[in-house]
Amino acid sequence: MKYLVIAAMILGSVEPLTASQAPGFANGAGATTASSFAGSIATARELYATARYDEALALLDDLITAGTTVPAERKAIEQYRSLCLLALGRGEEAETAIARVVRVDPFYVPGETEASPRVRTTFSDVRQRLLPELAAERYAEARALYDRKAFAESAVLFRELVVLLDDPQMNGRLPDVRTLAAGFVELATAAAAPPPAPVEKPEPEPARANAPAEPRIYTAEDDGITPPVIVRQDVPSVPSAIIGMARDKGVLDLVIDEQGRVISMALRSRIHPLYDTTLLNAARDWKYKPATVNGEPVQFRKLLQLSIKR
């Protein structure tokens, strides 16, 4: 009786596929249409409800042999197969079927109205075990798209990967992959964006006779200069996942104003695209006691040498 309750809860939640969702697939004697697939699933459900688990399982295995590659169909088949296998006491094979469901849709989690506590617990255990592997595979797929310059497609996959890595069942695993994925979201999105429309430059205004002069930017070579003093300069560390691809040294060019704020920054020598973005974002929050000449605060250009520790 408890298996019938499980079936009523989870099998009843799967809706028949429409023709647009499930194109036919070859079975050696013609094509299996969406309507015949839905009919086969309904038959398997009836067999399960009458405790004819072996017959239901055989029918579902025939659907797999027919060769469907539609994700929604494979997901439905494996959901039903897992229930039949659990009813037959074949727990290890049931977990394999659940794993196939997770691989088709790693974001799917059965709710309380879809499955019994026992099924949800088994599903949760299998999903938690598989998520790191699936996340690594999705990263490789998204990175391959990015390397082929399919930036729009890779941005979509990297966003999905970030959501997957933030899933509670990940338990904070793969933090370096999370950092990389978030960085690639920005890079891929920027690369996929269309170039801005050309802007017509307005005619320059006539020079004003009394226009104030631009403030001078001093350097360490100027006479009488007292360089700025660090108040806050937190340099972020390079993530371990990219440290092997990073350059050993870098040079950051900063302009510090009369209030000790960083008003301009540029990398003269880059380290790694992902780390460069993190470094420039961090530099905006740095603070200094401003440089002075004869006691008066002045703007100052500071060159910061960076060395990567491996």
Image: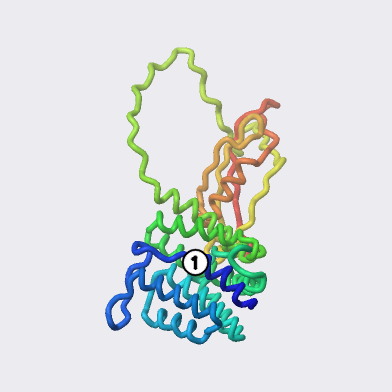
Residue at (56% x, 57% y) in the render: 163
Residue at (61% x, 37% y) in the render: 262
Quadrant holding the N terminus? bottom right
The image quarter in which residue 307 lies? bottom right
Residue at (52% x, 47% y) in the render: 267
Figure check: 93 above or below 223? below
Residue at (54% x, 55% y) in the render: 182
Q: Which residue is mark 1?
A: 14
Figure check: 179 above or below 266? below
The image quarter in which residue 107 lies? bottom right
For this rendering, which residue is in front, 253 or 32? Answer: 32
| Helix, strand or loop under label 1 | loop
- Outermost residue to the front: 50
For this rendering, which residue is in front, 47 or 163? Answer: 47
Task: Where is residue 156? Give x, y as percent.
Answer: 45, 56
Task: Where is residue 129? Give x, y as percent.
Answer: 62, 73
